[in-house]
């Protein structure tokens, strides 16, 4: 193993490190509180309930939701999308989605298509990985119920024109589901400006929470149609064996993952203190530096938008002569540059980009803790490895 310092460029998988306040919040809960949420009335349980409510409020503020009660806690972004899709769609419904999606969207939709008589249209993208709103509009049918789209690609970093698509959804009285896994915390997100009815995300990426945290925003128009996919104890209306109708209890059966939620609360506080716009500017500066460096290396192809305003800090590349998985291994073992290689759980996008046959791409994804030194180390390493191929 190289004795070089660790350069972590896999923030699209999960952010690392977390703020010290996140570690402290989880440790304090585990060691000093330890009570479940919403189940008891002693002092520690009341404090836990206050911390849960605080996290819910911070989430609502982050995406400009109408009320904190519309923020539903889940175990991760995949769980959130499953609740949205399985809870909303019925036999005979039609969904418009895209080839840009993550498997967290693609696989539930494929399952519903195969087993629940739901029809799905998958819209293509351009060479940057961006969907044309006019193609979304053209795919709408009389039976269309939902438009489901990722906000920022986890392969190319491309930001979709989500507000324009939200307008199309409203014009046709359709619901809009947004997968914000790679956007919330990286760019400003406003569910009302987007006209999003459902917005799903994990807590462990740019929001700096731990793994095992996720959430789903349920807007007023979606609430009346979204049925819970899990029933059980909520700590409320316990005298009845019927699932509560009120938010958020309707969708939050069972004990909460309190350590993850309080950690997420600390992460959200960190993000608010730093400011999403400031975090965005930091990542754009580093992304520009990375793109400039990569474009100067022979044999490297960069995927995604070239305009910094059309992307987040997720950069996908291929290097002539290097299978992505092998390249990622050498980057780690020889240079301690840590990235992700392969399909990044987005198989249809790789087919659209023409990268499927070579095993996908190499992904470098930036976060709040990355520095210019990290970027320069990655560029230096890739320059060396690309030169090896040219020399052979």
Image: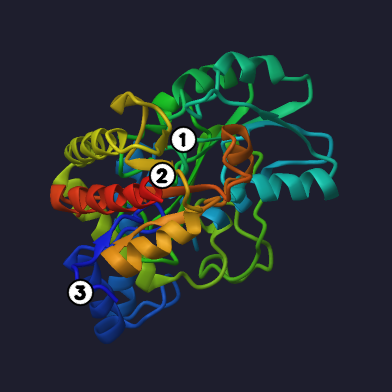
> In the rendering, at what x and y percent does residue 139 appear?
70, 20
> Do we see residue 73 in this rendering?
no
Could you tell me if the residues under marks 1 and 3 are in contact, i.e. CB atoms within 8 Å? Answer: no
Q: Are marks 1 and 2 in contact (CB under 8 Å)?
A: yes
Residue at (39% x, 39% y) in the render? 300
Q: Residue 117, image x and y in percent?
A: 85, 41
Q: Which residue is mark 3?
A: 3
Return the x and y of residue 35 as percentages of the image width and height: 37, 81
**Sooner in the amino-acid sequence: mark 1 or mark 2:** 1
The answer to whether residue 310 is seen in the rendering is: yes
Label disc, if present, on residue 283 of the rendered structure: none
- Residue 390 falls in image quadrant: top left
- Left-right relation of 318 to 343: left
Nearest the camera: 320 or 95?
Answer: 320
In what element is the residue under mark 2? loop
Q: Residues within 10 Å of mark 1 (few under 14, many from 20)?
A: many
Q: Which residue is mark 2?
A: 182
Mark number displayed over residue 151: 1
N-terminal of the two: label 3 or label 2? 3
What's the CA distance linking mark 3 and mark 2?
31 Å
User: Are the residues flagged by discs 3 and 2 in contact, CB closer than 8 Å?
Assistant: no
């Amino acid at each position: 193993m190289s004795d070089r310092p660790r350069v972590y460029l896999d923030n699209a998988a999960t952010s690392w490190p977390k703020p010290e306040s996140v570690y402290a919040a989880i440790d304090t809960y585990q060691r000093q509180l330890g009570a479940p949420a919403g189940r008891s009335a002693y002092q520690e349980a009341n404090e836990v309930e206050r911390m849960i409510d605080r996290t819910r409020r911070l989430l609502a503020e982050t995406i400009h939701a109408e009320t904190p009660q519309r923020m539903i806690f889940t175990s991760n972004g995949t769980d959130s999308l499953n609740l949205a899709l399985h809870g909303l769609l019925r036999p005979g419904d039609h969904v418009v989605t895209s080839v840009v999606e993550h498997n967290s969207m693609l696989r539930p939709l494929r399952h519903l298509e195969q087993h629940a008589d739901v029809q799905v249209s998958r819209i293509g993208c351009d060479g940057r990985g961006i969907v044309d709103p006019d193609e979304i509009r053209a795919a709408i049918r009389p039976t269309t119920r939902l438009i489901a789209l990722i906000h920022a690609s986890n392969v190319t970093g491309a930001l979709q024109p989500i507000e324009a698509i939200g307008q199309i959804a409203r014009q046709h009285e359709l619901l809009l589901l947004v997968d914000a896994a790679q956007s919330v915390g990286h760019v400003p997100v406003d569910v009302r400006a987007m006209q999003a009815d459902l917005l799903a995300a994990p807590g462990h990426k740019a929001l700096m929470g731990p793994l095992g945290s996720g959430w789903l925003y349920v807007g007023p128009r979606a609430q009346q149609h979204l049925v819970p996919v899990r029933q059980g104890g909520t700590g409320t209306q316990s005298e009845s064996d019927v699932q509560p109708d009120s938010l958020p209890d309707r969708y939050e059966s069972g004990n909460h993952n309190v350590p993850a939620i309080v950690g997420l609360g600390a992460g959200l506080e960190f993000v608010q203190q730093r400011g999403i716009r400031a975090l965005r500017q930091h990542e754009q500066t580093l992304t520009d530096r990375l793109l400039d460096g990569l474009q100067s290396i022979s044999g490297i192809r960069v995927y995604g938008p070239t305009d910094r305003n059309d992307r987040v800090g997720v950069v996908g590349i291929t290097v002539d002569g290097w299978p992505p998985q092998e390249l990622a291994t050498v980057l780690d073992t020889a240079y301690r540059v840590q990235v992700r290689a392969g399909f990044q759980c987005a198989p249809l996008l790789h087919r659209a980009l023409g990268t499927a046959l070579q095993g996908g791409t190499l992904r470098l994804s930036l976060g709040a803790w990355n520095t210019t030194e990290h970027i320069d180390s990655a560029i230096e390493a890739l320059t060396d490895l690309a030169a090896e191929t040219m020399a052979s």
